[in-house]
């Protein structure tokens, strides 16, 4: 029975981020390199990383904390199987497994505490069984059987959750079945007249883009996790993509959703682009985080692939100017496909990740640029920050657009800093999760979290949350100053999305994960106290549940609760997220 | 291990702890931020754990150096204070335009313009004029001038100016990390010049100081003060939205940008009685606002306690309290004060308290999300939650000021002499007490007050008799020593100028001039009231309670505390804590035994208890007389305005007739506080009668309050608080 999705398991790490072949390591010379062949950075030496790493965290390459190498099956709790359910599933012919590895792999997302436990070989409550439906009808059957036999179902897409959404509730006594959507990964049709595509919800982002690209289209939905996260997951968490300025967030992209619930299938009767038919039922589905049912098929908007793409970057003398520029760009509604502003610490971090340059000429140019910015323009290297840009469209319009944005930037003291810096900025997005695994090899733990906030509070929230993190680390006995940094990753008419990155060296702490959680908790309190939202796109899961009532009011909770009570009265979708 | 230079010597066997400490202090970010962070908990503001364990810093006399080196060089020396995160102070013009361009002011200008129908530009002009009138124009040259002049003046007036240098260091640290608010106690005009002088001396950033508009009346001096960092606010501007807006934005702009520490007096005005005044909340609200709204990470508030051994305005205050109106501040008046220069005013102690983090104060008390739904620049009344938070914080800060007030031995002597004065008078005995008796009692009181946590500056190396005589000689205007007996200088009955013969003195004039001395002495006694007030309330409660039952005593305590909450600094809503604190202290010092049910006075506790009750007795009697007045006199048409003169006349008659022993009841401060208490308790109401502010007296209630104060009526079961 084992091995229905063996390929996936073999190429993915079981206790870290991403592909098994891709990881950062310090080689024998003490230089950092990135292994594998999948990324632009793959196979390269990153000379600056070691110094940055040791300097920033007070870490030392001599002090290692390697993970437990192999999963020992004895550490995995035995499966509690509902025999009647198993029998009936068997008779449907839908593949399933209760192999320990399969179960453990689907028992977690990528929160720090989840990965930390895996690295230590500690396994908590895991699903008792995994099923792999291959189409909508399979899901209907499974849900019916689950209802019949009172089995707990937990939908599983790409497993990239960072909200403890995939954690099995320890108090759950029923058999927990992980419903893995990965085999429902086909594009069912493409409608070129209406520019829509009908897609099975288990497809992961990179496959969806690749397949659409083959027909000359794209969705343009590129969350940072798009290599691994699935369409169904995006819908269930209200995901946001890097290029939302052109293509929109998931709620703007979705035209039609089909979801299987214990009460039956929910969907709309037509594909009209907008309807006035009461509250939009899509909005009960989007963000339901697997508590109501399984999203099986989605009709999405598609666009012709952009003719031309251009990266760019702007250096600002300080973060305040940078934010002011982003605000102005948003005000004029001329944001490029993506515009992101990194603070000074992150700028330095990005700098440390520059791969070894091959030619003397490039390194000479780099030196010249640095000289120009810091000496000639008088930017303080400890204050300057950088915005990365991505333009898309036809060539002429892109160039025009680019000029408009750079002109605005100039008003805020911004200097164009080249395509390279921009492109590297976006590449970092994909490798940063790998870097966390490197940190964890050397006593450094960390994570990112996000919020959305009105424009007038962006600077305040950035300053206060970063300061709060530093203060809390100190108070909680962290022995080294933490990395506490942020970036503005999305702009809207009325506000922005802000990402915080936070990591520290935990040497000398007896329970680092607990300390980490306390600090993150405090940081979230600070975010809320500064007018930030509970989440912009990561979702609530179980990690941020405690703040839901304050976030949406008692009545709001009641509304959501009543939907849950109607749709799933027996709590078949019992992952206990959100409410 | 660390070498002396702080470098890790032994690399192989790393000592995690120490290696890492070092990193926090001088890590890649230069995070010195943390050095003091753990001292900043809200617990540092005020905790009544065990007053005997209070740790305080040592003092350093800053005049010592002034006496040996050039004042001119001192005034011209290089002055390079450290500022908040390294900002450079901005020009006043830049500051003003920041204020005028702020969102908040913009909003209010438009609002006022809409409401009044005036052109927005017109309103903006007005705002600009208000700002012009208000703003400081700190200039280093003026500061240097003051530094020079004040050095001369201070050296003549004072023996020493003692400052706790550790406090200055903490302040330096705080200024670098967060916007800082300085909250000195206010007992003298001298206070704010003194503060700036000290900060200049220690190379600390000079503060901008909120000053009352009355200073502006002094033509030249007003401008001088402005140039030394004062900004001027009108005494009352309750309804003036525009004024409030300019004012609050001005203060917040300075604070948020960290251009200078903001300094103001929490008590609002100089205390004429040396008791701390009920804190005023307006400015505290303003300086806490940027934190509450998330505009800064934190604000640090530094209580500063300035204790004068002898107050310059001593007899001025007493006269003012007795109804001789205070001379309007005028430049010529100030020069007349030159006579003052020839006198000895002892020493000053300035204690910079622990910086208090507003963030830690607010932790768990204020939900900052309340600002999420309305743009922050739109002025709104603070919510009830915030009002009560600011009020509680204000009380805690005043208590923090109080507890670091340095008490001189004279304060003990004044208390003892006053008590003795009244007891002798009652018993018709020979006035005064023997010097050695006074010394013995002073030593007893010294030990008691230390037990209660007083910050007493009693020189250890000197014999008690020397300490006593030195205290007496500094205050020879108030005491006479003849034939080995010490008494208050009330006999000659005048204070104004020695050798000024008065042929016809009416008994009332005689009484008033005696009262000047009594009130002056009382103001010194008042300096130690904060140490004893809770135990004294308990002592009096035991006295007036009908039984030893704990609940009974608590009810009396609660009644008295409620009665006197305008008179002394008693944090609102802290009755039970105060009762427990009082019990704790009196039990710990062996005065009381408190069981589950009963409160019992021990054999050796009587002396302390008697001292404590006598200390509070003038206030008890005073409030009773005020009640008597309201019951007996024709108060049908009495207005608030007429209250003080009328009650004063009533009291004078009582004193002359010998029905009242305490001349200090003549203090208008006490009379006002009593009226405020009666209004708070609902026994007196202000109504809109024929004349505004007419007082409506509920005689039955006033009468019963009087009886309860006199112990003739049992205290009602207190509704709100039970033990």
Image (cartoon, coloured by chain):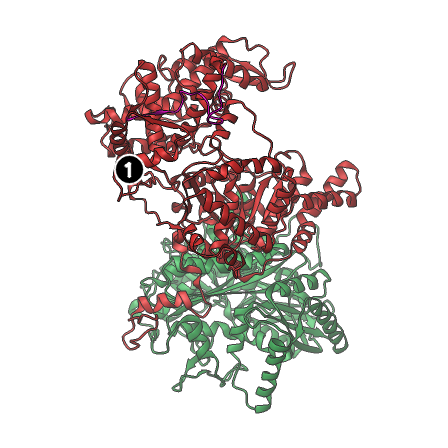
Quadrant for the C terminus of chain B, please.
top left
Left or right: residue A302 versus residue B150 is right
Looking at the picture, tell me which residue is in the foreground, B34 or A577: B34
- Picture quarter containing residue B10? bottom left
At 54% from the left and 63% from the top, the residue drawn is A499
- Picture quarter containing residue A537? bottom right
Residue A385 at x, y = what percent?
Answer: 59, 70
Q: Which chain is red?
A: B
Residue A489 shows in the view: yes
Q: Which chain is green?
A: A
Residue neighbourhood size for the residue with mark 1, other residues' Cα within 10 Å, grouped as few (<14), some (14–19), many (≥20) = few
B485 is within the stretch colored magenta = yes
At 78% from the left and 43% from the top, the residue drawn is B122
Looking at the picture, tell me which residue is in the foreground, B327 or B120: B327
B149 is within the stretch colored magenta = no
Residue A71 at x, y = what percent?
Answer: 34, 72
At 28% from the left and 69% from the top, the residue drawn is A74
Residue A279 at x, y = what percent?
Answer: 64, 49
Left or right: residue A7 versus residue B220 is left
Looking at the picture, tell me which residue is in the foreground, B540 or A373: B540
Residue that badge 1 annotates: B466
Residue A175 at x, y = what percent?
Answer: 38, 58
Q: Is residue B128 above or below residue B2?
A: above
At mark 1, the secondary structure is: helix
Looking at the picture, tell me which residue is in the foreground, A84 or B514: B514
Q: Going by the picture, which residue comes out furthest to the left?
A: B603
Quadrant for the N terminus of chain B, please.
bottom left
Q: Main secondary structure of the magenta part?
A: loop
Q: Is residue B170 above or below residue A507?
A: above
- Chain part drawn in magenta: B484-503
């Amino acid at each position: 029975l084992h091995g229905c999705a063996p390929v996936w398991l073999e190429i993915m790490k079981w206790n870290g981020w991403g592909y098994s072949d891709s990881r950062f390591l310090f080689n024998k010379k003490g230089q950092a390199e990135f292994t594998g062949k999948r990324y632009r950075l793959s196979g390269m030496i990153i000379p600056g990383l070691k110094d940055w790493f040791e300097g920033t965290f007070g870490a030392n390459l001599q002090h290692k904390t390697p993970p437990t190498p192999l999963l020992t099956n004895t550490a995995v709790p035995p499966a509690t199987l509902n025999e009647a359910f198993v029998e009936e599933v068997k008779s449907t012919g839908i593949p399933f497994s209760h192999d320990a590895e399969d179960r453990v792999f689907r028992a977690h997302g990528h929160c720090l505490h989840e990965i930390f436990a895996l690295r230590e070989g500690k396994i908590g409550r895991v699903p008792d069984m995994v099923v792999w439906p291959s189409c909508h009808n399979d899901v209907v059957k499974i849900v019916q059987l689950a209802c019949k036999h009172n089995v707990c179902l937990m939908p599983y897409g790409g497993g990239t959750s960072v909200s403890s959404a995939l954690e099995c509730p320890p108090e759950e006594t029923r058999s927990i079945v992980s419903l893995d959507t990965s085999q429902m990964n086909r594009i069912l049709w493409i409608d070129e007249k209406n520019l829509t595509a009908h897609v099975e919800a288990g497809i992961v982002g990179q496959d969806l883009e690749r397949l659409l690209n083959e027909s000359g289209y794209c969705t343009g939905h590129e969350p940072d996790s798009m290599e691994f996260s699935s369409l169904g997951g995006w819908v269930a968490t209200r995901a946001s993509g890097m290029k939302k300025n052109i293509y929109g967030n998931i709620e703007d992209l979705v035209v039609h959703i089909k979801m299987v619930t214990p009460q039956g299938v929910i969907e709309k009767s037509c594909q009209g682009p907008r309807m006035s038919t009461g509250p939009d039922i899509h909005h009960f589905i989007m963000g339901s985080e697997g508590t109501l049912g399984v999203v099986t098929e989605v009709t999405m908007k598609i666009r012709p692939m952009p003719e031309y793409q251009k990266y760019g970057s702007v250096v600002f003398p300080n973060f305040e100017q940078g934010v002011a520029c982003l605000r102005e760009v948003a005000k004029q509604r001329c944001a490029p496909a993506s515009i992101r502003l990194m603070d000074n610490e992150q700028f330095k971090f990005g700098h440390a990740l520059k791969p070894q340059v091959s030619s003397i000429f490039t390194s000479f140019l780099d030196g010249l640029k640095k000289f120009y910015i810091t000496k000639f323009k008088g930017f303080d290297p400890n204050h300057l920050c950088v915005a990365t840009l991505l333009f898309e469209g036809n060539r002429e319009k892109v160039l025009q657009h680019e000029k408009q944005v750079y002109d605005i930037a100039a008003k805020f003291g911004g200097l164009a800093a080249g395509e390279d810096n921009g492109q590297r900025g976006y590449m970092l997005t994909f490798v940063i999760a790998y870097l966390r695994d490197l940190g964890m090899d050397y006593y450094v733990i960390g994570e990112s979290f996000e919020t959305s906030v009105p424009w007038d509070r962006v600077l305040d929230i950035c300053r206060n949350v970063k300061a709060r993190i530093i203060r809390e680390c100190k108070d909680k006995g962290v022995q080294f100053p933490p990395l506490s940094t942020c970036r503005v990753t999305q702009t809207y008419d009325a506000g922005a999305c802000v990402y915080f990155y936070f990591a520290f060296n935990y040497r000398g702490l007896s329970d680092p994960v607990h300390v980490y959680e306390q600090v993150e908790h405090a940081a979230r309190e600070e975010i809320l106290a500064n007018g930030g939202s509970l989440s912009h796109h990561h979702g609530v899961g179980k990690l941020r549940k405690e703040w839901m009532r304050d976030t949406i009011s008692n009545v709001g909770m009641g509304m959501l609760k009543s939907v849950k009570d109607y749709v799933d009265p027996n709590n078949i979708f019992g992952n206990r997220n959100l409410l | 291990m660390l070498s002396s230079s702080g470098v890790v010597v032994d690399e192989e066997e790393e000592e995690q702890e120490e290696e890492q400490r070092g990193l926090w202090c001088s890590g890649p970010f230069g995070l010195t931020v943390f050095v003091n962070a753990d001292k900043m908990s809200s617990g540092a503001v005020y905790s009544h754990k065990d007053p005997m364990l209070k740790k305080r810093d040592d003092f350093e006399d800053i005049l010592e150096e002034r006496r040996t080196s050039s004042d001119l060089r001192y005034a011209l020396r290089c002055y390079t204070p450290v500022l908040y995160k390294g900002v450079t102070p901005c020009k006043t013009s830049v500051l003003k335009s920041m204020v005028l361009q702020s969102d908040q002011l913009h909003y209010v200008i438009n609002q006022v313009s809409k409401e009044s129908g005036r052109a927005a530009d017109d309103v903006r002009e007005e705002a600009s004029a208000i700002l012009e009138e208000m703003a400081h124009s700190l200039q280093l040259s003026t500061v240097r001038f003051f530094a020079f002049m004040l050095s001369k003046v201070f050296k003549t007036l004072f023996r020493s100016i003692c400052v706790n240098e550790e406090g200055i260091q903490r302040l330096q640290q705080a200024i670098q990390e967060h916007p800082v608010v300085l909250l000195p106690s206010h007992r003298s005009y001298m206070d704010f010049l003194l503060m700036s002088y000290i900060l200049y001396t220690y190379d600390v950033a000079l503060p901008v100081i909120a000053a009352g508009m009355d200073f502006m009346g002094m033509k030249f001096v007003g401008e001088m003060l402005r140039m030394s960092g004062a900004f001027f606010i009108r005494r009352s501007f309750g309804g003036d939205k525009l004024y409030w807006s300019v004012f609050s934005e001005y203060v917040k702009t300075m604070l948020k940008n960290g251009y200078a520490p903001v300094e103001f007096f929490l008590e609002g005005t100089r205390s004429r009685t040396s008791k701390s005044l009920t804190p005023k909340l307006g400015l505290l609200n303003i300086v806490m606002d940027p934190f509450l709204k998330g505009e800064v990470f934190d604000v640090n508030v530094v209580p500063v306690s300035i204790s004068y051994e002898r107050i310059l305005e001593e007899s001025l205050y007493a006269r003012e309290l007795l109804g001789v109106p205070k001379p309007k501040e005028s430049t010529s008046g100030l020069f007349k004060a030159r006579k003052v220069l020839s006198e000895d005013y002892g020493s000053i102690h300035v204690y910079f308290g622990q910086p208090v983090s507003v963030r830690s104060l607010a932790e768990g008390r204020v939900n900052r999300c309340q600002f999420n739904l309305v743009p922050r620049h739109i002025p709104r009344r603070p919510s009830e939650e915030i009002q009560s938070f600011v009020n509680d914080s204000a009380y805690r800060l005043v208590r923090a000021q109080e507890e670091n007030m340095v008490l001189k031995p004279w304060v003990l002597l004044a208390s003892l002499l006053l008590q003795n004065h009244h007891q002798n008078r009652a018993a018709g005995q020979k006035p005064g007490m023997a010097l050695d008796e006074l010394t013995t009692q002073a030593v007893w009181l010294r030990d008691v007050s230390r037990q209660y946590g007083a910050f007493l500056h009693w020189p250890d190396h000197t014999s008690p008799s020397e300490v006593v005589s030195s205290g007496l000689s500094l205050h020879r205007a108030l005491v006479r020593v003849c034939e080995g007996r010490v008494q208050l200088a009330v006999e000659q009955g005048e204070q104004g100028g020695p050798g000024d013969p008065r042929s016809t003195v009416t008994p009332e004039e005689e009484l008033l001039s005696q009262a000047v001395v009594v009130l002056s002495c009382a103001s010194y006694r008042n300096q130690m009231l904060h140490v004893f007030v809770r135990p004294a309330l308990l002592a009096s409660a035991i006295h007036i309670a009908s039984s030893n039952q704990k609940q009974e005593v608590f009810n009396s305590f609660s009644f008295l505390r409620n009665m006197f909450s305008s008179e002394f600094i008693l944090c609102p809503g802290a009755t039970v804590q105060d009762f427990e604190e009082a019990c704790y202290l009196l039990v710990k010092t062996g005065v009381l035994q408190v069981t589950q049910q009963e409160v019992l006075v021990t054999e050796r506790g009587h002396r302390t208890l008697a001292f404590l009750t006598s200390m509070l007795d003038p206030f008890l009697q005073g409030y009773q007389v005020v009640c008597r007045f309201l019951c007996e006199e024709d108060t049908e048409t009495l207005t608030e305005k007429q209250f003080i003169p009328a009650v004063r006349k009533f009291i004078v008659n009582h004193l002359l007739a010998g029905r009242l022993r305490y001349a200090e009841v003549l203090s208008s401060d006490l009379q006002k506080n009593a009226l405020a208490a009666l209004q708070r308790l609902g026994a007196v109401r202000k109504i809109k009668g024929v004349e505004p502010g007419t007082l409506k007296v509920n005689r039955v209630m006033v009468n019963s309050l009087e009886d309860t104060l006199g112990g003739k009526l049992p205290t009602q079961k207190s509704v709100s608080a039970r033990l």
